Image (cartoon, rainbow, N blue to C red):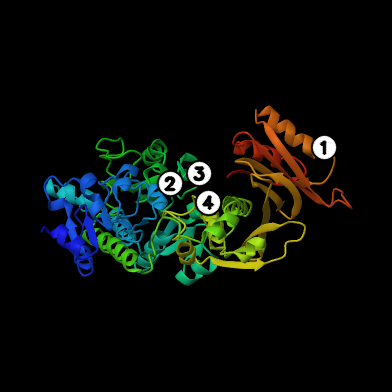
Amino acid sequence: MTRAERSQAGGMTRVLVAEKIGASGIDLLREHFDVDTAFDTEGFDLDARIGDYDGLLIRSATKVTADVIGKATNLKAIGRAGVGIDNVDVPAATKRGIIVANAPESNVVTAAEHTMALLLALARNVPQAHAALTQGKWERSKWSGTELEGKTLGILGFGRIGQLVAARAKGFGMRIVAFDPFVSAERYRELGVVKADDSDGVYAEADFLTLHLPKTPETEGWLDAEALAKCKDGVRVLNVARGPLIVDEDLIAALDSGKVGGAALDVFRSEPLTESPLFGRPNVIVTPHLGASTAEATDRAGYQAAEQVVAALTGGAVTTAVNVPAIKAEDLEVLGPYVPLAAHLGRLAMALAEGSSVDRIEVELLGRIAGRDTRPLTTATLLGVLHGRTEEDVNAVNAPAVAEERGIEIVETKNASARDFENLVRVTVVAGDVRERVVGTTFGRLNRPHLLEAWGQRFDVQLDEHLAVFRYADRPGMIGRIGTAFGEAGVNIVSAAVGRQADDASADHEAVMVVTTDGAVPGDVVDGVVASDGFTGGRAITL
């Protein structure tokens, strides 16, 4: 009888480690299960063998497609030793009831430490001096550097990695100024970091500027010529986050002019990259995407993924699962239509509170939905709030932990009564003394989401993917000006609704208008409307 046959006959749980990970992770698995290692088995056929295993641990090379999952008749858990899960068909796994978990915290220390390595190298010209000396040049005066003590480090993006960088930089006596509207003011105070009101506040003070932003359509090209012009002369720039955050041509021009005194780059717009106008410059340091590359990070990723597989197969708590936790079918039937509504309201509330430092998210659930297991609704709201605004990937399982790290309190309340409606979802973003509330529900057999309140005014408009919200003095002609501006810009309005003080409308009162459109509303169109007489606010939002 083969080992596999003995294991199956005894009912022993079997786990396959498809790719090489640290020994500590494999040892942990072997404490609990019968473990096979495909990476040291020549010609291992995953498709043919996957049906033998209850658990699977992979890195980035193994592709767990829907076809592979279809053959995985016994599979209950997939562990990914790393952050990304692009090589796993998560929907297919979820449909089969297979837990998929990753190791999201495995490389944060490594990335923070690499940022510090580049910061020190940039300040003291270490690579340049090393290269000169090995070429037989003794150039002490040429490569004289600057001290970090007393200098200001500007951090754009103050999530887990940004906060670790701040703690380490403070050890060098640096003053830290950071901007991230999705971190509470209390968290800045706890860490002894100055909270800038916006990115311009960081540019104005930073001697060194480090980026720790996520890559989204909004952040791509964040550090461009306009941003660099707001920086102090001679600022030094670091990027260990995402290559597309910087406009390379603008950085080169700023290096040439002396506006930027130096740059240290670990990531690039396209990778791998071996030739670039940035390479070979005496004031530019580059590394080939080493931010997550240490033996410890690799070992940690394997061990954390192994922990999750053990938990999944032994009935423990899987804390980094990326697919949604199961809820009762009867609850999901009632709550299902409200999950996308809650996510939309979360994104909308954050857009209307843009520029604020978030302290608390309040989710109020009213009506018959309040009698259900409403965790999916609160989680969906939080995912909407955090969408595209954190460096780390956020999913239905880790969203509460990400919010907690940023000092954002989540408060859920329920009430079985919903005046005038069968069910209501209210989402409020609290930032100091500022409260921005949005309210919505669903209508009809198709459960179409409707927005009922925003910016303090009530109305009723069906939510579509693209919309714009305006606040203005309640007087004749204002609605027409919005329509004219949109028409001139070629933006087609699908629907519109206005909220106002119905009994006493005058120039002393404000109204709010929501318009939905069949395409994204350009920001300059909204800015143009808001800049005209009588308008006090406007936002373009894509849900």
Identify the residue at image location x=11%, y=57%: 2
Classed neighbour count for the residue bearing mark 3: other residues with Cα under 10 Å, few (<14), some (14–19), many (≥20)? few
Marks 1/4: CA–CA distance:
35 Å
Q: Quadrant of residue 350?
A: bottom right
Residue 62 placement, left or right of 217: left
Q: What amino acid is at disc 4?
A: Asp
Q: Secondary structure at mark 4?
A: helix
> The residue tagged with tag 1: helix, strand or loop?
loop
**Mark nearer the N terminus (2 vs 1):** 2
Q: Earlier in the sequence, mark 4 or mark 3?
A: 4
Query: Which numbered disc flags the more N-terminal residue, 1 or 3?
Result: 3
Residue type (three-letter) at the residue carrying disc 1 = Gly
| Residue designated by label 1 | 477
Q: Give the distance between the C-alpha atoms of the residues marked 3 and 2, in whole angstroms.
A: 8 Å
Q: What is the number of the mark on residue 218?
A: 3
Q: Nearer the viewer, mark 1 or mark 4?
A: 1
Disc 4 or disc 3, which is closer to the eye? 3
Residue ID for mark 2? 215
In screen coordinates, is 196 left or right of 484?
left
As measured in the structure, the alpha-carbon distance from the residue carrying label 2 to the one carrying label 1 is 40 Å
Q: Which residue is mark 4?
A: 200
Q: CA distance from mark 1 to mark 3?
A: 33 Å
Q: Amino acid at mark 2?
A: Lys
Can I make out residue 142 in this image? no
Marks 4 and 3 close (CB-CB < 8 Å): no
Q: CA distance from mark 4 to mark 3?
A: 16 Å
